[in-house]
Amino acid sequence: MKTNPRYLTDVLMTALAPAIWGSTYIVTTSFLPAGYPLAVAMLRALPAGLLLLLLVRKLPFGIWWGRAFILGALNFSFFWAMLFVSAYRLPGGVAATVGAVQPLIVIALSRFFLGKPVRPLAVLAGLAGMAGVGLLVLTPKAALDPVGIAAGLAGAVSMAFGTVLTRRWAPPVSNLTFTAWQLTAGGILLVPVALFLEPALPALSAANIAGIAYLGLIGAAFTYLLWFRGLSRIEPSAAASLGFLSPVVATLLGWLALGQSLAPAQVAGFALVLAGVWLSQRATMPVRPTRPAASPQPANHPA
């Protein structure tokens, strides 16, 4: 049996999305005004979604109006809101570790909504990835806050539902159009939340605008196009496990750009995360049978 090379290409392209998401922390802390997470989330989603809508020139139709807003809420509005609540109330390591439960939730939801079998190797991969993220980002001084933990779990459940429903509903449009619908819907839902729960944004500097442009065009439009493309081609549990790459990239960027040190436990965390990602892909990767060797033809002997 041989591994399907097209599937490997799909996995690598999908993995680019969470890898790029790993740059969100350093961009947010270095380029964006502090204290406006919901407004920044809205500015990350809505302009990018509207720009993609201008490119595709296709609005949702029929049942897809409702589905676009449901998925926009699950993948963007509610998920990002819960993510920010978790990040504000918990140390970053605790928040990341709580969010790392998402692949296990996806496995359970895939069984219920998609009829996918629960593979023990995929469960082991999810546990290994969670342990790796914990080693990577947790510190001995990590404190637990019930509201922050509840928000982190709610965000993980939201993204897990969005991942599975994206695969189940399989829209009859291109991935670019589907990304445009969801980003726009998610951004629209964030507008009233940001207006009522946060003070008005200050005047934005050139650095602020550059950071928002990066998060919108690269960290949202480009990456979610890759993400939704991947969800249409690979198993949801395999795609969800690729999310472990985000804290890996965030830690590496902190080490390279901010001069942060790497402890031995973090190096072990890297190894566990990569092992978890590999195990998850191994558990779900389709294989193609090798061609049987042609049987030798009998020689023609003259009579």
Image (tube, rainbow, N blue to C red):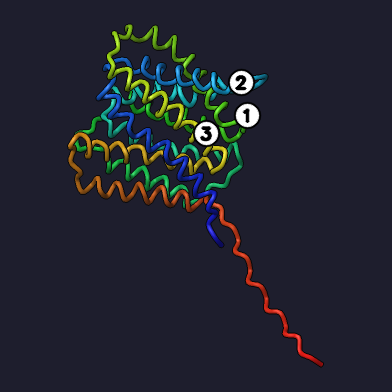
Could you tell me how many numbered marks the image carries? Answer: 3
Residue at (43%, 41%) from the top-left corner?
Answer: 15
Residue type at the position of mark 3: Phe
- Residue 228 appears left or right of 58: left
Q: Name the residue under label 1.
A: 173
Nearest-to-viewer mark from 1 and 3: 1
Q: Using the image as rendered, state which of residue 115 and residue 168 is in the foreground.
A: 168
Q: Mark 2 points at which residue?
A: 58
| Residue 258 drawn at (x, y percent) | 20, 34
Nearest-to-viewer mark from 2 and 3: 2
Mark 2–mark 1 distance (CA, rounded to whole Å): 9 Å
| Circle 2: element type | loop
Residue type at the position of mark 1: Val
Residue type at the position of mark 2: Lys
Mark 2–mark 3 distance (CA, rounded to whole Å): 17 Å
Location of the N terminus by quadrant is: bottom right
Quadrant of the rendered image containing residue 78? top left
Mark 1–mark 3 distance (CA, rounded to whole Å): 12 Å
For marks 2 and 1 on the same chain, the one whose residue lies earlier in the sequence: 2
| Residue 8 drawn at (x, y percent) | 49, 50
Q: Mark 3 points at which residue?
A: 228
| Residue 89 drawn at (x, y percent) | 29, 23
Residue at (53%, 57%) from the top-left corner?
Answer: 3
- Give the class, few, some or many, for how many residues have Cα within 10 Å of label 3's Cα (few <14, many ≥20): many
- Give the class, few, some or many, for how many residues have Cα within 10 Å of label 2's Cα (few <14, many ≥20): some
- Residue 85 appears left or right of 3: left
| Circle 3: element type | helix
